[in-house]
Image (spheres, helix red, strand yellow):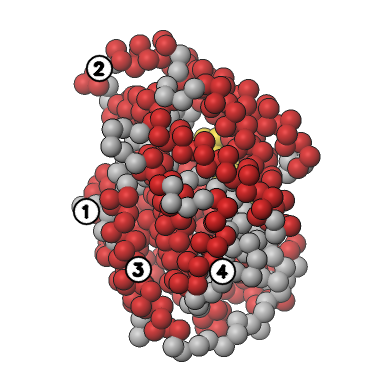
Amino acid sequence: MQEYLEKAMALQAALTMFDWDAETIAPEGGAGCTARVVGVLSAEYFSAMTNPRVRQLAAACREEELDASQRAVLRTLRRRLEELEKIPPEEYRAFRELLARSPVLWKQAKEKNDFAGFAPVLEQVVQTSRRFAALRAKEGQAPYDVLLEDHEEGFPMAVLDPFFQQIKEEIIPLLRRRQEKPLSPAPRRSCPVEKQREFNLWLARYLGFDFARGVVGETEHPFTTSLHNHDVRIATHYYEEDPASGIFSTIHETGHAIYEQQVDDKYNLTLIGGGTSSGMHESQSRFFENNLGRSRAFWSAIYEKLQKMLPEAYGGVPLEEFLQEINRAEPGLIRTEADELTYSLHILIRYELEKQLFDGTLFVSDLPAAWNEKYREYLGVVPASDSEGVLQDIHWAGGMFGYFPSYALGSAIAAQVEAHLRSIMDLDGALRSGSLGGIRSYLKEHLHQYGGEKKTNELLLGMMGEPFQPGYYIQYLKNKFGE
């Protein structure tokens, strides 16, 4: 069976390379032809994974004769087989070609503020995603739950609905109370992109990114991907008029990358070679970005470095003022620029819209109006254009339905991880001293090294003796943004 899986993983690595290339340096004009190449590779991947011999060997394996990592590979393989064998091969290839083209069309639509022009493509993506989910669904299972389980196993709507209801009940009132005391306009900072790039590369290294096993590129929508733990790729962005955006984008993506780089070598080029789930992955990026990266202790060690490297933006700004700026809490339109208090409300909106798209109560053509209404209801702001509204994220163009809840789950898990770390180490002391190695080592020992062998709640139970508990997140936000 190993030869089949090695071929499948090699094809997957090639597809990952095309994804990275498409989002960073590939010319837009080549998207159509490249999509055909992606289609061929995807068909070969499908064939390698669904080879009858693979099914025979997977059925013949006896779990009691395998070690923990081998059992995890077998469970993942069997699940992957169940998923793929229910999808017609020609439709799988066509969908992969569509997903290779649609992000380029999304980018063009966003630049032109042209949702109507992109809507037919998005309609195809939604319809096919819904059809595939329905084909894969177990008896009585909602199609949207199929997609949620793809990103975070064990967290269907029955779990997420109460979680988001708690966010509604606790966070929206807290935000309303904050809004009773209007903030003065945020100061404008500006710095040449070349200097930002230099500082952000230094910052990624400071956080622990290993440049011998990774690279940093630039893109419209930041992301991190990997071929294996020795080739991990960050794509971040820089805005001359907003250097803080690039800084926190880089911290966020470096959190993802550290997770990937700290997966044990024995999982490389296997079905469990990356992080265990989207939610756990987002917990690590959000932990580095917010729980560490917006703290006084973190910046007290490196703020002088920031001032020296970006003097145009921060040379004359006291640390206290900088901390106030990066911890402002006020409603905005853009998810990736949102503060910690309002961030999960952005996710709540997307979660509710996705549920409606997949239960048939919302049509793609009605998305802009529904989007704007929810932003008015939950955040009290309304997009002036679709580019800063329904077109702002790449996820739906890439068929990533069910992923958005992972961001809110990740934020909640990050708060739980922080509470645990504070109970077993002097977290602030480590940050003030600039010694992040102990933090990374602990995360590697208890979370990162296992790759996809263990699921989210297994990892949390092993590290702190309890499963996912959203109460930590609610309390974290109340402590930080309450009276």
Q: Are marks 2 and 1 in contact (CB under 8 Å)?
A: no
Q: Amino acid at mark 2?
A: Arg
Eye-nearest disc, 3 or 1: 3
Closer to the chain start, of discs 4 and 1, is: 4
Closer to the chain start, of discs 2 and 4, is: 2
Task: Kindly identify which numbered label has been placed on residue 62.
Answer: 2
Q: Note whether residue 39 is visible.
A: yes
| Element on which disc 4 rests | loop
Q: Quadrant of residue 69?
A: top left
Residue drawn at (28%, 29%) of the image: 68
- Near-viewer residue (318 or 341): 341
Residue drawn at (52%, 39%) of the image: 127
Count up the numbered dots: 4
Image side of residue 305 versus residue 293, left or right: right
Q: Quadrant of the N terminus?
A: top left
Closer to the chain start, of discs 3 and 2, is: 2
Task: Kindly identify which numbered label has been placed on residue 333.
Answer: 4
- Near-viewer residue (165 or 206): 165
Q: Quadrant of the C terminus?
A: bottom left
Q: Note whether residue 265 is visible.
A: no
**Mark 3 to mark 4: distance in Å?**
18 Å
386 to 21, vertically: above or below: below
Q: Residues within 10 Å of mark 3 (few under 14, many from 20)?
A: some
Q: Amino acid at mark 1?
A: Glu
Task: Kindly identify which numbered label has been placed on residue 168.
Answer: 3
Closer to the chain start, of discs 3 and 4, is: 3
Q: Amino acid at mark 3?
A: Lys
163 to 234, vertically: above or below: below
Residue 281 placed where, x, y %?
Answer: 43, 49
